[in-house]
Structures are given as structure tokens and as C-alpha cells.
Amino acid sequence: MADKTTLQYTAEHEWVLVEGVVATVGITAYAAEKLGDVVFVELPDVGSGIAEGKVIGEIESTKSVGELFAPVDGTVVAANEAVVSSPELVNSDPFGEGWLIKVEFETLPTLLSYDEYSRLVGE
Amino acid sequence: MQIEQKAAAPSGSGHLSGSGDFASRHIGTDGVAQLEMLSVVGYDTVEELVLAAVPEAIHVEPLEHSSIPRAATEREALAELRILARRNRVNRSMIGLGYYDTITPAVIKRNVLENPSWYTAYTPYQPEISQGRLEALINFQTMIEDLTGLDIANASMLDEGTAVVEGMLLARRASKSASNVFLVDADALPQTKALLANRAAAVGIQLHETPFDLDPADVPELDVFGAFIQYPGASGRVWDPSPVIAAVKAQGGLSVVAADLLALTLLKSPGELGADVAVGTSQRFGVPMGLGGPHAGYMAVKKGLERQLPGRLVGVSQDATGHPAYRLSLQAREQHIRREKATSNICTAQVLLAVMASMYAVYHGPSGLKLIAQKVHAETALIARELREAGVDVRSDSFFDTLEVGVVSADATLAAARERRINLRKVDDTTVALSVDELWTDLSGATEDLLAVFGVTARGGWDGLSPRTVREFESELVRTSDYLTHPVFNTHRSETAMMRYLKYLADKDYALDRGMIPLGSCTMKLNAATEMESVTWPEFGGIHPFAPEEDIEGYLQLIEDLQGWLAEVTGYDEVSLQPNAGSQGELAGLLAIRGYHHSRGDFNRTTCLIPASAHGTNAASAVLAGMKVVVVATNELGNVDLDDLRAKIAEHADDLAALMITYPSTHGVYEHEVRDITDAVHTAGGQVYVDGANLNALLGYARFGDFGGDVSHLNLHKTFCIPHGGGGPGVGPVAAKAHLAPFLPGHPMAQRDTIGHRGDAEQPWHRNIVSAAPYGSPSILPISWAYVRMMGAEGLKAATGAAVLAANYVAARLRDHFPVLYAGDNGLVAHECILDLRPLTEATGVTVDDVAKRLIDYGFHAPTMSFPVAGTLMVEPTESEDLVEIDRFIAAMIAIKAEADAVAAGRWPADDNPLVNAPHTAQAVIVGDTGTGEWEHAYSREEAVYPVKSLIRGKYWPPVRRIDQAYGDRNLVCACPPIEAFAD
């Protein structure tokens, strides 16, 4: 599980782990809790290009639907198949095994720090 | 007595007392009870209370002349319905086109259709107390999956025509093709074509109609996202559509096949032919024609398309102890969650009729169904042979149950048939069509009469024709695959077994025949026996939707009466009864607004403003009417934020089409500023759609049309007593001011245009058709007719008063235990109140779910959960509950609050208390969780199942523990599980 304090965040409750030119993206524990029991995850195809702010996937729970927004411009280099077959990983380990996609990017937009995100969700 | 008159007859009429009066039986609280309730709420009379709650600016002006007659007694109303029924003429129908006479097994009629345990239930949102009808629905789904050869079927559609439309929309969503064109079979049912044309135009899909009687080599290379095929065709033609399906698939499109379920017992299934989607109706499985409805449509899809399905889907999950249990699956597809991004706007479907059709299959079994189909097919073949041998021009050479016959004059042949009380169908001036059905094969002398119409005397009889061997279609299309092999379709052969199976299922469920269902926004009021009485009369049931006008005089009178009465009580000019559910009424209303703007050249008016608090269906319907949804904020009081509304109107000054508001609001409040809201929209050139879901709180006191509404839908299955049937049928009339009347639903085959004020005669012939049948679901309209007839205008008003009093009484009694979230003028609610459980959850960890499931242990159906505000319960007692039952509910809520407080105080652990473990089955308290009989909880067995003493004498036992929602969605199973799954 990643160290939450060193991750970057978006206002759409996604976390971003930057390693070189690859960003790993998941949703925060706060978002997972708000969604409830996740039952279905739809992720973009590996190799597809994504544009910051656009909807690229869906996370569905028994009672609600969350959209996955691209946090950066780039190309999807990996999608977490484990989450597709076991959506409950998003609830049980959102910052670890519940990661969603890895994106190769050129420039990183300004994202929220841990402190900024914590203030956003009032924690 | 004086007291009773004062309270129960708010407008001063004294004749409401006395046992001959229906209103006093429909309304649960008598004058004495109402006085007691009024003293709690703080008013002297019901009239005073309602006039204080409803803003003065919208109070109704007294009518000089009312079209609603003085209230009839129950006997009088039935006598009048008898007269109307006698004005209908039941002929032997051979009209076909998707509607066939059928024999409803009496055991199903008596134990399902006429049984309040089935017809008074609500949509199974509380699955723990709905296992009976959920099992019946999974039987329905299994039946559809088996017969269509597809993987996943939903739990019914509104009718075949709209199911085809939904199939088209599904294909558009799921196809990767960039094309905007949908291919339509030229041999499709005419009503289906009209529906496709109207609905496709609204969302910008292009239709391309083509005859499919082609050689496979000639299948056009068209760029389409999908194709629709009628199987067998409207002409009766049976053909092999697999080359067309393959060609569509090759270029990325999906195929939607409308298939006749009875034919599928003999014909290769759509799934085997390669179809992606199958749709149709289950009407001929034991559901009377009823001038067009209600019947259960169906839809089935290939695996992989299940998340694209519209409507409700029953799946198997497990309860807290791992036992299999049924529930509604994949609800996140639906409009109440996904709003404008939902797969469809459908909410109410046709559950009661789906249950009947599934039980018809349980009753007959696969071999019985096949025999019915064989008899129908053989009788058709016999008619063809006899006619041919006599030299008549039979044009059909490959058929199941329908023939086209060439004649000198179709009109003369139809007239000759009518002399023998047979209704044929005119195809063109020199062609007639005839369809054989289950009833026909059981009528002695029918075929001889038919042959005589053509001047033919039967000669060969059955010589050389055996129902089991006749085949008048190519051998490649013969069905060889099994269907309905599950034991449920092969066990209940005797009537005793059938009766007991229906009772076994009904006993699992909680319906109005057990107790109160205080579902906010759903209006679970009485469905009186007298109102239900005529639904099963043959003069209403045995009428084909396209029967000649002279056969349906009684029906047309009833329809026009009801339209007039509904127009009067809502303040509109015209009403169409065609929409089969509230969602369809919304769509019809929005399409009328669209048509109006277009007629004025305002093609850019496409923005629909919808308050954040609106029901999700509003947004889903707007999208289907080709509009863009813009959300208007609600303020801290739960009302439309006027500043935000004005800002949004200014922003969309050029493209504002409509505002949709619900009145009273979805928060159960009479918004004070409603006139300011409607004025602002009109000034900007927009139209006002008032959602009539909450009309029960307004009748007799205010009218939509008077405070600025241009168009509304009503829910006859709420305010006007049509039972919910466990999730349908519904009727969602659309009512409008005269300027929108030309755009209300019409139908190409309507016997009579019952809507006046049409104005422009140049309207397109399909005129915003939204249902397959011209008048929607006429066979249940006598319910609402009888309600209005027996209540009279005074009684309707008294019902409103009693409903508003009941809600305010509940709010007043529970306010000290749970905050009541919103209120309007003078701190009053309308007909429902929202209890805020969030502070309780914060303080104790006890959730809305826990309270809802605990109410089951107390013998109640939960109120509406988390709508319109998450973490709350919305309570609507309706006027029909008596004070004893209302007080029992209040006592249960107070007791549950005390239980939650005990958790907070540490008396019970947060993870082991009667709330988190609710509901408790008999097995749970006797056998225990570990199966040893040991009781290992922090609370006693008695506290678990008998929290109040009165339950000892009359207890509803839920059949399963709390159901794991996530398990069922993660492991989707939507067919009957094997019997072994239930072995312990």
C-alpha cells in the first residue's frame, strides 16, 4: 500500500502515484467509502489515449455509480485486471491492490497534495 | 353524529357518514380518529389544516359545474359498470398483430389476479419481504431466457412496441458502429413501426425500412448500428433471419428480434439464430387482451449486454447466513441512480402480468405449451388446406398461426365475418389476414364458421393432419433445443399443487393485505375490492385492441368519462390515457412540449431544467425526448432555489424548452413560491411540466393547470387506486392545456380520437405515440373509474384531507424522536414526511438500512429509503390507513429509536444488536447462527422477534435474513437456481 501522504490527488477523489513518466491511478478510501460496495469496474483499454478531465471508466456499487476521470493526458499502459475480476479490492485496499490504471504521460498537471485533499474532504 | 360530519366532511357536506358511503370505507380514519389526530397537529378541522398547508395563492376556485357526478354506492357503481360492459361486444378475434385470445387458467385468475397478496404488493425494493414474487419473476426470466435462447432476461417491459424501442436504444449504446441508422423489417407490426418512428425522431436516429424476403446473397451492405426483425412477421410469414443477422453483425451492428413466445416452442430461438436481443410480449400466456393491456413485454440479451438492459432484473444472492435469496440486481443501471445517464426511464413495469404469464408456463409446463402451439399451428394449417382446396387464394406458404388470404373485397369479407361474430383483419382492399389462437382451438364450430365466411364447407376435416406432426415452415427452423427443463415448470401439474405453490409464494411476501406500506412518494393506498371487481369481466378482458369501434362503445364511454374527470381535477383541457406508466407519461408530456416548440419553429428549445431534488426518472425521460438536462439547485428548505432558477433561465434564454417540477415537491412540501417559479419559466418562453406523482396531496384543493402547469402526468396507480401489482401495471395519463393538446399521444389504429382540441389536422399520423395500444391499458381503467365514481368530488377532497392529516400526525408524533427534514407554510408537511436518520447514524452507527430491516421484525414494510435525501426515511401513510395502524407504526419507530439509543449507551455492542442483525427469521432464533440451537447474541430471542407483545398473536415471519446486495451483483445469476442450492 502506497504512503498516502506522498501521493497526489484530484478533486474527483482520485490518487496519483508518479514514478518517472508513469502515473498509477486509483480512487481514494473516502471515495470508496462513499460509493459503498463496489460491484463492477470498467477501465479503458491498454494502449488507448486519454485526455485530462475526460470520463474514461466507471465504478459501480450496489447503489451508485462513480465516473473515473483521466487525471492527466497520456496513454494507458496498464489496467488492473484483478480489480475487474474482483471489484471488492477497491473497497478493501483502495491505495494498494485496488489501483485502477497506469498512464504514461508527458507533462503532469497541478494536482492536490495530501494536505490539500484532506482539507477538501474535511478530514 | 356531529363530530363525524365536522371532521370527515371538510367542505360541509353531511352525507359522508353512514355505512352505505364508499368514501368512509376508503378513508381509514373516521371523524373521531381525525379529531384526535387534529388535536395533536394543532388544528380544529381538516379543512383548516389543509388550507394552512397549501399556499393560499394556489387554492382552487369552486367550480360552477362539475362533470364528476354525485358519489355512487359500491352497488350502484358496479351496476353502471355492468351497463358499460354490455356495450362492449366480445367477438371471436382473429386480428392478431401481437394480441391473441388465451385461456387464463382459473387457478391463476383466482389466486394471482384476484388475490390482494399479489396485486397490492409494491416493487420488491425490500427483498427480504418479497421473496415470493421475486421467485415468480425469476421464473418469468428463466421462461424468457429458455424460449428465446438468450442468456439474461429482465423482469418485464411495458409492452412489445416499447420493448422494440428499448432494443433499438440498447443497440445504439452497445454497438461500436458509428452509424446512426437502424434497419427496420418491413413486415414489422404497424404499431411497432409507428413507435419506432416517433421515438427515433426524438433522439436523432434514422430508420431505414426494408423488406427482408431476400436471398442471403442479396442482404444489403448497409452501414447500420442495428436491425429489427419481426419473427414471425406481421403477415404471419415464418422465415430464416439468420443471414440478415449475420450480415448486420459483420459490420458491427446488433440484431433485435421480436419473437412470438408461443411460436418459439416450435421454432428455432432468436439466440440460436444469432440475435443479440429478443423482445416481445407474454400476453398470449394467459393474460386477457383487455383492449390492449396491461400485459408484460419482455427483453432478453446475450451475455455481455446485461449492463445495457433497461428495467428491472431479478438475481440470486445470499442472505446473512449464506442461504440463497433473490433480489433486484444491477440497480445502478436504473434511472433512480443514474438519472440522465440511465439505460432507460422505465421504473414501473408489468410485474403482476409477468407473474401471470410465468405461472401459465408453470401450469402447462413445456409439453403443455408445445401442445397449445401445435394445436394452433395445426388449426391454421387445416384452415389453409380447406380454403385452398375450395379454390380460395391463400397467399401464405410458410406460417405458424397467421394466414393472408386474397379476396374480391376485403370490406365485404370483414362484414361477412362480423355476421358470424368473427373479427378478421384488413390488409389491403383485396387481402384479409386471420390469426388462430389458443381460445380459437377450444371453440367448437369456430373453424366451420370461418370457412363459411369464404363460402367453403369443410370437407377433409382432420384427415391426415395431426397436431403433433404438422409443419408449415422449413425444416431448418424446427426447434430441437430443450426449454423449461427446470423442475418448477415440471412439478405443479395438479390444481392442488398449483394452488399451494401460489399460496407458498404469496405467504413469503408483505403486501397491503398484511399491513401498512408507508412508502413515501409511492402512495400505497387501498385498492378496493369493488374497484377490482370488473377487471376480470370477459366484456373488458376479451376485446382486441384493434377491434372495430362498434365493439368497444362501453370502453370508449368509460375512457371519455375518465379523461373528463381527470382533466377537471387537474385543471387541464385534455387527457390521454395511453401512457402505460408514469415514466411514459413524462415522456409523452415532454414530447408534446417538443412538438409545440417545433410547430412554432423553435427547434433550438432543447434545454430542460430539473431541480436537484427531482425523481431520477425526470432526467431520464428528458434525454429520451431529445432534451439536454440542466440541474437547478435546491435551497436549504428543500425548495427550488429561485435565484439559481433565474440564473439558469437567463443562461438558457434562447434554448429553454421546459422546467420539470414536482408538486407538492419530492420532499413532500407545498412550495410557497410555485407561482413565481412557473411565471419565470413562461416569461422566458419555456413550458412548465408538473410531475403529478404527488397529486394525492392536492385533489380538491389546488390544480396544476391553475398555478401554471402546461402539462403533467398522473399516476393512476398512486392517486387513483390501481394496485401496484408488485411493480406494475401502471397507468400514467398525460394531461395538458389546449395549446399542447395537438401533440398528445395518438395512434395510427385508434378507433376514435378521444382527444379534442387537436387543432391542426396536418399532424403526422402517429402523433407522439408512446404505447403499442391506442388507449394504453384499458382493462384496468375501470378501477380508477370506479374510484372517482364512488368518491365523487367531495370524497376525493376528503381523501386528500385525510392523507395530509395522517402525514402531519406522523410528523408531529415522531418529531421528538427523529428530526422531520422539511416543512412548508406554517411548519406543515403535505402528504408525506421525511424522517432524518443521519443524526442517529452519527450518534449510534445504526443506519437507515438497519432501521428499515428492523421494521420487518416489527411487522412493517419500511418507508422509502434514502429518497429524496440519502440517510433518511420518507413516510406516506395515505388516507386509507386507520389510526390504530398509524399508531402501531409510530410506536414501532419510537421503540426502534430506543433500541438504537441502547446501542449508543453501550447496552448492546455496535456489531451485535437487534438492529444490525435484522431481520430475524424463525430459523435464526430456533436453530441459531451456528446451527446448534445455541443463542449467542447480546440480546434475547424474544427481543429479536417479539419486540412488542402484540406480535405474539400475529407475526409476519420473513423467509430470509438480510440479503447481501454486493454478492448478488458480483456473482450475477438471473435464472432459477438448481433445487440443490436450497438444500441445507
Image (spheres, coloured by chain):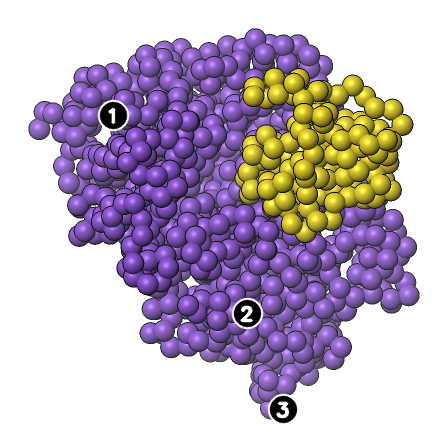
Chain colours: A yellow, B purple
- The residue shown at (81%, 43%) is A78
Q: Separation of disc 3 and disc 1 at Cα?
A: 77 Å
The nearer-to-camera label among 2 and 1 is 1
- Disc number for residue B387: none
Disc 2: which residue: B437
Pick out the residue farthest to the bottom: B464
Residue B45 percent coordinates (x, y): 20, 19
Q: Does B537 sit above or below residue A90? A: below
Identify the image quadrant of residue B856. Answer: top left
Q: Chain of mark 3?
A: B
Instruction: Tell me the quarter of the picture where residue B847 sits.
Output: top left
The chain that hosts pointer 2 is B
Q: Is residue B726 above or below residue B89?
A: above
Label 1 chain ID: B
Which residue occupies 52% across, 65% down? B977
Name the residue nearer the viewer: B171 or B598: B171
Report which residue position mark 3 lands on.
B464
Q: Amino acid at mark 2?
A: Asp
